Protein backbone atom coordinates (compact mmCIF):
# COMPACT_ATOMS: atom_id res chain seq x y z
CA UNK A 1 0.00 0.00 0.00
CA UNK A 2 1.57 3.27 -1.11
CA UNK A 3 1.43 6.43 0.99
CA UNK A 4 -1.41 8.10 -0.88
CA UNK A 5 -3.55 4.98 -0.48
CA UNK A 6 -2.75 4.95 3.25
CA UNK A 7 -3.86 8.57 3.62
CA UNK A 8 -7.00 8.03 1.57
CA UNK A 9 -7.91 4.96 3.64
CA UNK A 10 -7.63 6.86 6.94
CA UNK A 11 -9.84 9.63 5.54
CA UNK A 12 -12.44 7.13 4.32
CA UNK A 13 -12.37 5.52 7.76
CA UNK A 14 -13.11 8.91 9.29
CA UNK A 15 -15.98 9.51 6.87
CA UNK A 16 -17.48 6.21 8.00
CA UNK A 17 -17.48 7.28 11.66
CA UNK A 18 -19.11 10.58 10.72
CA UNK A 19 -21.67 8.90 8.45
CA UNK A 20 -22.57 6.25 11.00
CA UNK A 21 -23.66 9.00 13.40
CA UNK A 22 -26.80 9.17 11.23
CA UNK A 23 -27.78 5.89 12.87
CA UNK A 24 -28.95 7.90 15.87
CA UNK A 25 -31.66 9.63 13.86
CA UNK A 26 -33.46 6.28 13.47
CA UNK A 27 -35.96 5.16 16.08
CA UNK A 28 -34.39 1.88 17.16
CA UNK A 29 -35.22 0.00 20.37
CA UNK A 30 -31.51 -0.11 21.28
CA UNK A 31 -28.07 0.78 19.93
CA UNK A 32 -24.74 -1.06 19.96
CA UNK A 33 -22.80 0.41 22.89
CA UNK A 34 -19.36 -0.71 21.66
CA UNK A 35 -19.99 0.85 18.24
CA UNK A 36 -21.08 4.09 19.96
CA UNK A 37 -17.91 4.18 22.09
CA UNK A 38 -15.71 3.58 19.05
CA UNK A 39 -17.41 6.32 17.03
CA UNK A 40 -17.00 8.67 20.00
CA UNK A 41 -13.29 7.83 20.16
CA UNK A 42 -12.75 8.07 16.41
CA UNK A 43 -14.35 11.50 15.94
CA UNK A 44 -11.86 13.24 18.23
CA UNK A 45 -8.68 11.16 18.00
CA UNK A 46 -8.07 12.14 14.38
CA UNK A 47 -7.75 15.82 15.28
CA UNK A 48 -6.04 15.28 18.65
CA UNK A 49 -3.18 13.21 17.23
CA UNK A 50 -0.75 13.61 14.34
CA UNK A 51 -2.90 11.89 11.74
CA UNK A 52 -3.23 12.48 7.99
CA UNK A 53 -6.47 14.40 8.63
CA UNK A 54 -4.81 16.63 11.22
CA UNK A 55 -1.90 17.24 8.84
CA UNK A 56 -4.22 18.31 6.01
CA UNK A 57 -6.18 20.55 8.39
CA UNK A 58 -3.00 22.19 9.69
CA UNK A 59 -1.90 22.92 6.12
CA UNK A 60 -5.26 24.33 4.98
CA UNK A 61 -5.07 27.74 6.63
CA UNK A 62 -8.31 29.36 7.78
CA UNK A 63 -10.48 26.69 6.12
CA UNK A 64 -8.63 24.01 8.07
CA UNK A 65 -9.11 25.90 11.31
CA UNK A 66 -12.83 26.21 10.63
CA UNK A 67 -13.14 22.49 9.89
CA UNK A 68 -11.28 21.51 13.05
CA UNK A 69 -13.48 23.85 15.11
CA UNK A 70 -16.56 22.28 13.51
CA UNK A 71 -15.34 18.75 14.26
CA UNK A 72 -14.66 19.63 17.90
CA UNK A 73 -18.07 21.28 18.18
CA UNK A 74 -19.63 18.19 16.61
CA UNK A 75 -17.91 16.00 19.18
CA UNK A 76 -18.94 18.12 22.17
CA UNK A 77 -22.53 18.55 20.98
CA UNK A 78 -23.24 14.97 19.92
CA UNK A 79 -20.68 12.71 21.67
CA UNK A 80 -19.36 14.84 24.54
CA UNK A 81 -19.99 13.96 28.18
CA UNK A 82 -22.43 16.87 28.49
CA UNK A 83 -24.30 16.00 25.26
CA UNK A 84 -28.09 16.12 25.47
CA UNK A 85 -28.41 14.10 22.24
CA UNK A 86 -26.56 10.90 23.15
CA UNK A 87 -26.27 9.83 26.77
CA UNK A 88 -24.87 6.53 28.00
CA UNK A 89 -26.95 5.22 30.91
CA UNK A 90 -27.24 1.99 32.89
CA UNK A 91 -30.03 0.81 30.60
CA UNK A 92 -28.13 1.56 27.37
CA UNK A 93 -27.64 4.50 25.05
CA UNK A 94 -30.36 7.12 25.33
CA UNK A 95 -31.04 9.19 22.23
CA UNK A 96 -33.00 12.45 22.15
CA UNK A 97 -34.97 12.03 18.93
CA UNK A 98 -36.12 15.63 19.07
CA UNK A 99 -32.62 16.69 17.96
CA UNK A 100 -32.15 14.82 14.67
CA UNK A 101 -31.55 18.05 12.79
CA UNK A 102 -28.52 18.83 14.96
CA UNK A 103 -26.93 15.59 13.78
CA UNK A 104 -27.72 16.44 10.14
CA UNK A 105 -26.23 19.91 10.66
CA UNK A 106 -22.81 18.48 11.55
CA UNK A 107 -22.64 15.28 9.50
CA UNK A 108 -23.31 17.02 6.17
CA UNK A 109 -20.50 19.63 6.14
CA UNK A 110 -17.89 17.43 7.83
CA UNK A 111 -18.46 14.48 5.53
CA UNK A 112 -18.46 16.72 2.44
CA UNK A 113 -15.23 18.41 3.55
CA UNK A 114 -13.47 15.07 3.99
CA UNK A 115 -14.69 13.97 0.57
CA UNK A 116 -13.24 17.19 -0.85
CA UNK A 117 -9.87 16.18 0.58
CA UNK A 118 -10.16 12.77 -1.05
CA UNK A 119 -10.96 14.34 -4.42
CA UNK A 120 -7.87 16.51 -4.05
CA UNK A 121 -5.72 13.48 -3.27
CA UNK A 122 -7.07 11.62 -6.30
CA UNK A 123 -6.26 14.58 -8.51
CA UNK A 124 -2.72 14.78 -7.09
CA UNK A 125 -2.25 11.04 -7.64
CA UNK A 126 -3.33 11.38 -11.28
CA UNK A 127 -0.87 14.24 -11.86
CA UNK A 128 1.98 12.23 -10.34
CA UNK A 129 1.04 8.89 -11.94
CA UNK A 130 0.41 7.26 -8.55
CA UNK A 131 -1.92 4.28 -8.24
CA UNK A 132 -4.85 4.78 -5.88
CA UNK A 133 -7.47 2.76 -7.75
CA UNK A 134 -8.34 0.53 -4.78
CA UNK A 135 -8.93 3.42 -2.38
CA UNK A 136 -10.84 5.32 -5.07
CA UNK A 137 -13.18 2.37 -5.57
CA UNK A 138 -13.80 2.13 -1.82
CA UNK A 139 -14.44 5.86 -1.57
CA UNK A 140 -16.98 5.63 -4.40
CA UNK A 141 -18.74 2.78 -2.58
CA UNK A 142 -18.75 4.86 0.62
CA UNK A 143 -20.22 7.86 -1.20
CA UNK A 144 -23.05 5.72 -2.58
CA UNK A 145 -23.84 4.38 0.88
CA UNK A 146 -23.50 7.75 2.64
CA UNK A 147 -25.85 9.55 0.29
CA UNK A 148 -28.34 6.71 0.42
CA UNK A 149 -28.27 6.64 4.23
CA UNK A 150 -28.60 10.43 4.47
CA UNK A 151 -31.63 10.33 2.17
CA UNK A 152 -33.10 7.43 4.16
CA UNK A 153 -32.73 9.19 7.53
CA UNK A 154 -33.50 12.68 6.23
CA UNK A 155 -36.67 11.62 4.43
CA UNK A 156 -37.83 9.66 7.48
CA UNK A 157 -37.46 12.81 9.57
CA UNK A 158 -39.12 14.92 6.89
CA UNK A 159 -42.13 12.60 6.72
CA UNK A 160 -42.62 12.89 10.49
CA UNK A 161 -42.42 16.68 10.30
CA UNK A 162 -44.91 16.71 7.40
CA UNK A 163 -47.38 14.72 9.50
CA UNK A 164 -46.86 17.02 12.48
CA UNK A 165 -47.35 20.09 10.29
CA UNK A 166 -50.64 18.84 8.86
CA UNK A 167 -51.84 17.91 12.34
CA UNK A 168 -51.03 21.42 13.59
CA UNK A 169 -52.95 22.93 10.67
CA UNK A 170 -55.96 20.68 11.36
CA UNK A 171 -55.95 21.74 14.99
CA UNK A 172 -55.94 25.39 13.86
CA UNK A 173 -58.88 24.68 11.49
CA UNK A 174 -56.68 25.01 8.41
CA UNK A 175 -55.00 28.24 9.47
CA UNK A 176 -51.32 28.85 10.14
CA UNK A 177 -50.43 28.85 13.82
CA UNK A 178 -47.32 29.31 15.93
CA UNK A 179 -46.97 25.52 16.05
CA UNK A 180 -47.33 25.02 12.29
CA UNK A 181 -44.89 27.87 11.55
CA UNK A 182 -42.34 26.33 13.92
CA UNK A 183 -42.68 22.92 12.25
CA UNK A 184 -42.58 24.59 8.83
CA UNK A 185 -39.20 26.08 9.71
CA UNK A 186 -37.94 22.61 10.67
CA UNK A 187 -39.23 21.27 7.34
CA UNK A 188 -37.36 23.98 5.44
CA UNK A 189 -34.17 23.25 7.39
CA UNK A 190 -34.41 19.52 6.72
CA UNK A 191 -35.02 20.15 3.01
CA UNK A 192 -31.90 22.37 2.98
CA UNK A 193 -29.80 19.48 4.33
CA UNK A 194 -31.19 17.08 1.71
CA UNK A 195 -30.53 19.71 -0.95
CA UNK A 196 -26.95 19.99 0.32
CA UNK A 197 -26.46 16.27 -0.22
CA UNK A 198 -27.69 16.67 -3.80
CA UNK A 199 -25.62 19.81 -4.46
CA UNK A 200 -22.39 18.07 -3.40
CA UNK A 201 -23.15 14.82 -5.20
CA UNK A 202 -20.73 13.70 -7.90
CA UNK A 203 -22.22 10.25 -8.48
CA UNK A 204 -23.41 9.91 -12.06
CA UNK A 205 -24.88 6.39 -12.18
CA UNK A 206 -28.56 6.12 -13.04
CA UNK A 207 -29.31 3.81 -10.11
CA UNK A 208 -28.39 6.43 -7.52
CA UNK A 209 -29.76 9.40 -9.41
CA UNK A 210 -33.09 7.64 -9.94
CA UNK A 211 -33.46 7.34 -6.15
CA UNK A 212 -32.31 10.93 -5.64
CA UNK A 213 -34.92 12.13 -8.14
CA UNK A 214 -37.64 10.34 -6.15
CA UNK A 215 -36.54 12.16 -2.98
CA UNK A 216 -36.92 15.56 -4.58
CA UNK A 217 -40.18 14.68 -6.31
CA UNK A 218 -41.52 13.81 -2.86
CA UNK A 219 -40.35 17.19 -1.58
CA UNK A 220 -42.12 18.86 -4.50
CA UNK A 221 -45.34 16.99 -3.64
CA UNK A 222 -45.05 18.05 0.01
CA UNK A 223 -44.37 21.71 -0.79
CA UNK A 224 -47.05 21.97 -3.46
CA UNK A 225 -44.64 22.52 -6.35
CA UNK A 226 -45.96 19.37 -8.02
CA UNK A 227 -49.40 17.76 -8.01
CA UNK A 228 -49.72 14.20 -6.76
CA UNK A 229 -49.88 11.56 -9.51
CA UNK A 230 -53.45 10.75 -10.49
CA UNK A 231 -54.96 8.12 -8.22
CA UNK A 232 -52.21 8.30 -5.60
CA UNK A 233 -52.27 9.66 -2.07
CA UNK A 234 -49.47 11.19 -0.01
CA UNK A 235 -49.22 7.85 1.78
CA UNK A 236 -48.61 6.11 -1.55
CA UNK A 237 -45.81 8.42 -2.73
CA UNK A 238 -44.18 8.47 0.72
CA UNK A 239 -44.17 4.67 0.87
CA UNK A 240 -42.83 4.34 -2.69
CA UNK A 241 -40.04 6.82 -2.00
CA UNK A 242 -38.98 5.25 1.28
CA UNK A 243 -39.10 1.76 -0.24
CA UNK A 244 -36.90 2.93 -3.12
CA UNK A 245 -34.32 4.44 -0.76
CA UNK A 246 -34.31 1.40 1.54
CA UNK A 247 -33.87 -0.93 -1.43
CA UNK A 248 -30.96 1.14 -2.69
CA UNK A 249 -29.23 1.13 0.73
CA UNK A 250 -29.66 -2.65 1.02
CA UNK A 251 -28.04 -2.98 -2.40
CA UNK A 252 -24.98 -0.77 -1.88
CA UNK A 253 -24.18 -1.54 1.78
CA UNK A 254 -22.73 -5.04 1.14
CA UNK A 255 -20.66 -3.70 -1.77
CA UNK A 256 -19.13 -1.11 0.54
CA UNK A 257 -18.39 -3.65 3.27
CA UNK A 258 -16.77 -6.08 0.84
CA UNK A 259 -14.33 -3.44 -0.42
CA UNK A 260 -13.82 -1.32 2.72
CA UNK A 261 -12.99 -3.95 5.35
CA UNK A 262 -10.07 -5.57 3.45
CA UNK A 263 -8.55 -2.15 2.75
CA UNK A 264 -8.71 -1.09 6.41
CA UNK A 265 -7.37 -4.45 7.56
CA UNK A 266 -4.40 -4.02 5.24
CA UNK A 267 -3.78 -0.54 6.64
CA UNK A 268 -3.84 -1.85 10.23
CA UNK A 269 -1.38 -4.65 9.36
CA UNK A 270 1.03 -2.16 7.83
CA UNK A 271 0.73 0.12 10.84
CA UNK A 272 1.41 -2.77 13.21
CA UNK A 273 4.39 -3.87 11.12
CA UNK A 274 5.75 -0.33 11.34
CA UNK A 275 5.23 -0.24 15.09
CA UNK A 276 2.75 2.63 15.02
CA UNK A 277 -0.66 3.83 14.04
CA UNK A 278 -1.41 5.37 10.64
CA UNK A 279 -4.81 6.55 11.88
CA UNK A 280 -7.77 5.31 13.89
CA UNK A 281 -8.29 1.59 14.23
CA UNK A 282 -11.30 0.08 12.45
CA UNK A 283 -14.33 0.22 14.71
CA UNK A 284 -16.33 -2.79 15.75
CA UNK A 285 -19.41 -2.41 13.64
CA UNK A 286 -17.61 0.15 11.46
CA UNK A 287 -19.60 0.86 8.36
CA UNK A 288 -22.67 -0.49 10.09
CA UNK A 289 -25.75 0.17 8.01
CA UNK A 290 -27.91 2.86 9.53
Image: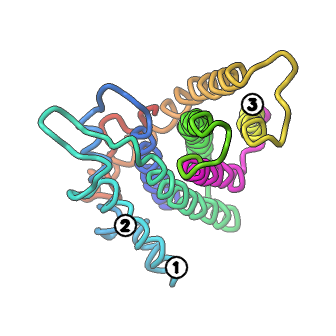
Q: Secondary structure at mark 2?
A: helix
Q: Which residue is mark 1?
A: 60
**Residue 288, position as x, y percentages in the image:** 41, 33
Q: Which mark is residue 73?
A: 2
Mark 2 or 1: in front is 2
Is 156 placed above or below 272 here? above
Residue 132 seen anywhere in this rendered image of the structure? no
Residue 207 forms part of the magenta stretch = yes
Kindly identify the residue that appears in the image at 63 percent across and 65 percent down: 120
Q: Which residue lies most toward the left here?
A: 90
In the image, residue 192 lies in the stretch drawn in magenta: yes
**In front: label 3 or label 1:** 3
Instruction: Give the left or right position of residue 166, taking residue 199 as reference.
Output: left
64 versus 103 height, above or below? below
- Residue marked by disc 3: 207
Give whichever of discs 3 and 2 has the lower sequence position. Answer: 2
Counting residues from the start of the chain, the first of labels 2 and 1 encountered is 1
- What residue is at 29 percent from the left and 47 percent from the top? 86
Amino acid sequence: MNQITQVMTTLIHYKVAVRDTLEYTLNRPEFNIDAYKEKKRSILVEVDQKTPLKNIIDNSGENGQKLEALIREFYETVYGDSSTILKLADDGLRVDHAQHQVIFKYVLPIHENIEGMLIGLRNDAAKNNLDCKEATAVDLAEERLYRGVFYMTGVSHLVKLFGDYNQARREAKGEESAASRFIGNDINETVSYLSGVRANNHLTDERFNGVQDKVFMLIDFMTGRRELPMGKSFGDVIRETQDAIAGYVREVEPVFQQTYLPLVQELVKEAQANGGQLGGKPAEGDGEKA
